[in-house]
Amino acid sequence: MSWTHEYLLYDPDAGNRPELTGLVSDFQRFSIHDGPGIRTIVFLKGCPLHCAWCANPESISPRPEIMLISHNCIGCGKCIDVCPAKCFGASDRIVCAIDRDSCLLPECGKCQRVCYANAVNISGRYLTVEEVMEVVMRDREFYDRTGGGITFSGGEPFAQPVFLLELARTAKVLKLHTAVETCGYVSWNIFNSVLEYLDIVLFDLKHMDPAMHLQGTGVDNQMILENAKRVDASGKPIRIRLPLIPGFNDSEENIRATAGFIASFSNLEALDILPYHRMGEPKWGQLHQDYKLHDVAPHGKDRVLELADIARSFGIEVTVGG
Amino acid sequence: MATKIDVTNLPGPTPRMEAIKKRFINTTPEICVERAQLITESYKETEDLPTHLRRAKAFEKILNGMTVFIADDELIVGNQCTKPRSAPVYPEFSCKWLEAELDRLEKRAGDVFLISEEKKKILRDLFPYWDKKTSNELATSLMTDDALAAQGAGVFTVGNYYFNGVGHISVDYAKVLAQGLNGIIAEAKAELAKVDPTNPDDLKKMHFLHAVIISNEAVIAFARRFAAEADKLAASEKNGQRKAELQEISRICQKVPAQPASSFWEAVQSFWFIQLVLQLESNGHSISPMRFDQYMYPYLQMDKGITAEKAQELLDLLYIKFSEINKVRDEGSTKAFGGYPMFQNLIVGGVDSEGEDATNDLSFMCLQATANAKLYQPSISIRVHSNTPADLYRKAAEVSRVGLGMPAYYNDRFIIPALLSRGLTREDARDYGIIGCVEPQVAGKTEGWHDAAFFNMSKVLELALNDGVDALTGKQLGPKTGALDTFTSFDDVMKAYKTQMEYFVKLLVISDNAVDIAHGQRTPLPFLSSLVDDCMVKGKSLQEGGAHYNFTGPQGVGVGNVGDSLTALKKLVFEDKAITLAELKKGLATNFEGVDMESMRQMLLNRAPKYGNDNEYADTIAHEGALIYCREVEKYSNPRGGRFQPGLYPVSANVPLGTVVGASADGRKSGTPLADGVSPVSGVDQSGPTASVRSVARLDHVIASNGTLLNMKFHPNALKDDRGIQNLVGVTETFFNGGGTHIQYNVIARDTLLDAQQHPDNYQGMVVRVAGYSAFFTALDKAIQNDIIARTEQMF
Ligand code: SF4
Ligand code: SF4
């Protein structure tokens, strides 16, 4: 995590301020694969989908939550002493378990304050639009020189619609290039209200088959496909992103169906094939959740390129890695 | 030029070049004893002569007596030793360390040299002659006891020039190409005609000018030995094409460097002879070609017959020659200068003396040669200014992508004003190049003494927090500035730091000046001096103040650690009152032993803002910590009539200098490496490269006019397409616009490096940028390898 010093400590009262706040799980400055140029990604916490391969599992739940990095623990016992709900379990002084049901978050957060070793981390900060923009604006010069800007990601940014709208509107007032990374599972009214403040939409299509989509993500894909068409029809540039998950959506059939579906789009910039990687796995552990893809090996490069070529045969621009 | 050069599509490596490179890579460095033998003989013969003449006679003897050879298929000729990559021995500078380490050379962890028992014996037999005669021993006798004690404790090291020659020079190559050494000799003779030997200064001048003439004639004769060798080979050569090449080599070596060059090949060969013999005379590294694209371009333009392919091949072959130059250092120094580095810095682009863009075809070809040769020499650099052509920037970024850690990017917009503030004329400042790693100066006029010392700023802070007592030895090393728990405010801390700084910078100056005087007395270099203004006019060697501009540039190391330590103190002790001074004192004294102390260490590490994360609080303090060093250094003068000027880069000295610094208030454990250059402390630059760049730009680069250094390490993915190149340019430009002077990019993935550590055999040819230079990764000491790996990887 890359919290600047000001937001290092979780503040339980930050969400109760009179100003509008949103729940941000992280920032990533100097992102270069999520929209043009050098960008800052703002990760908004909370997502209506539940994908087993998620690389940012801490952004699924719409509430602050503890991420425990046990190998950072130095066994000082401070968190155990301070926790009013007696949530922590240790073995050999090293904290390794949390009773998440008893945890008082979003109130409290005491454990994180005393864990200097950053073993106890809390994902999620309630920030105002101004606070988010203060971080984002630091890299203004980089954006201006490279055609970059701000990317809203998550989680699902549209899951905090009012906050997202305000962020996007403010970003446009500040003349920033804006992008959103979305799973598309959001009512069109909401999507449309934000769309006018977006310069480009990065739109995930995880599976073309409704049943498979439901099985993999927990939701149906009908609204998603509809929204993709509507975004295209709105005239905004759209990039379709396909996280390529071995054994789930990597069949030639699905690639053809995806490419076929978007080949008729008039504002399609490209299809970005995002090869599966396991870099998110440790975070699942820190949340004490099962990573179900533990044994799934990433594709070989050749296979990814083959699939990209198949997609290309539909006459669309295809990139690997975004 | 007969054919127009398409700079966007330059020729790749030729089979000849690949074959020669392969031969080069498969050669293991050895120790060559020829030079040591020849100079010892000469010194024995000339004991009655004045020093300058002794030096010239010795130089002549070496050039006349050493083995010369022309290897198969070579077009550019000239060898430093009996074999490529071997290192000569320079006993007149120092030899006790070599005598002591002779048996370690093959066994040490990094920079291994082979040497036979027979050669060891030759050296052991000649070393006793040099006892008490070296520049090193004279320097020691000139130093004070407290200065020697501070060196012993690792507060600073003047080791490079103390034990070796100075090097760190760029001569007036343009003049040699245009006038030939005959022109230099004529100039010396003209000066000689003006001499009045009844005037005592002129008497010295006379000997110096005679030494100049002898040395220059020796170089001409040396080149002609290659002409003779080429003739001999041509006579027995069966292959008609090669025979013709050898005949051409013979013609060229007969002509240059004595006479002006009149083709590109002649110019390259003439340049190479100069570059080569400077090494043989001086025992210095960082002898830098600098603005090669500028002074060589006229010869490419005038060469009607040459094709782009031929010109590129000559350049590529020259780059292999650069890489053949080698130097043996003591084992301690290999930790600071790992990877057989010679730091021959070649810089392209930038503005001309009028301030206009100076880019030409050769600027592109020099970059291409780096991509073709994929070797670590020369260190290639590019000067960037407001009107740098987009194509050149792109070419540079393409070369960055090759993963050699080169080129390094330099910022005209801030370096030129920094040099103006040091007294250079506008024309000279605009004509700057880079010496060695990152040190700017103007060629042919400057004795910059750029690598005067590594000064351990972190050690000074350690002493300031410990009443002047060395935490590792318990000795009182500095003035008593009060125990840590007697301080009542952050100001007290800063005062103590300042007082210690004043004291140790003084000792540093004494040490540097002692070494400087010793070089002037024992090892003046007449040939080198003849190629730098105003030595001949003044009648003084470079080592005695003959140059037009004179500087001494010691480097401060540990900016990030000092900044983070002071920040943690200010924030956690004096503002938040989360830690008491007594607790901190205990933590530092015990190296944070025990859970309570470890908990405090974690607080120091994770609860104070850190330099390099775009946090103004921490960056301002780091700036202040560095400035105190810089301001102190600037106060002093050197024996050559010049000023001291500070720099802030460590080469890889941040690793060995870290071993002598006890636990520090930034949470760093005793003995672990310091931060690299002005880069943030490893692992704390978690906010990514844009944040690091903004932080580093906040440092005052203009005051550190001897150079600063920012290393950025990127995943290879980062530069995989045009967008990546655009982003690299964006980062460079933003940094430079904010005041940064130097940036370089390492684009090798962390996993690759880890694997290379495990399986060095698979990575023999892999070059990484270590600090101000590039080296074969597998040749590096494990600790330096680890440090490179630990630098926070900037993931894309
Ligand atoms: S406070 Fe942190 S370091 Fe200490 S026991 Fe708890 S988890 Fe471990
Ligand atoms: S947030 Fe509070 S209740 Fe939850 S684990 Fe931490 S200290 Fe316990």
Image: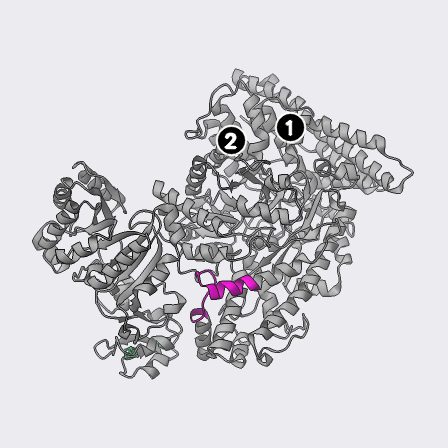
| Quarter residue B599 falls in | bottom left
> Total of numbered circles in the picture?
2
Residue at 66 percent of width and 58 percent of height = B633
Residue farthest toward the front in the current orientation of the protein: A173
Residue A25, position in %: x, y? 28, 64
Residue B10, position in %: x, y? 44, 29
Residue at 44 percent of width and 55 percent of height = B789
| Quarter residue A10 falls in | bottom left
| Label disc, if present, on residue B177 of the rendered structure | 1
**Residue at which label 2 appears:** B360
Residue at 58 percent of width and 77 percent of height = B484
Quadrant assignment for ligand 1? bottom left
- Tell me the SS state at disc 1: helix
A234 over B655 or under it: above or below:
above
| Label disc, if present, on residue B65 of the rendered structure | none
The N terminus of chain A is located in which quarter? bottom left
Residues shaded magenta: B605-624
Residue B110 in view in this figure: yes
Amino acid type, label 2: Asn
- Tell me the SS state at disc 2: loop
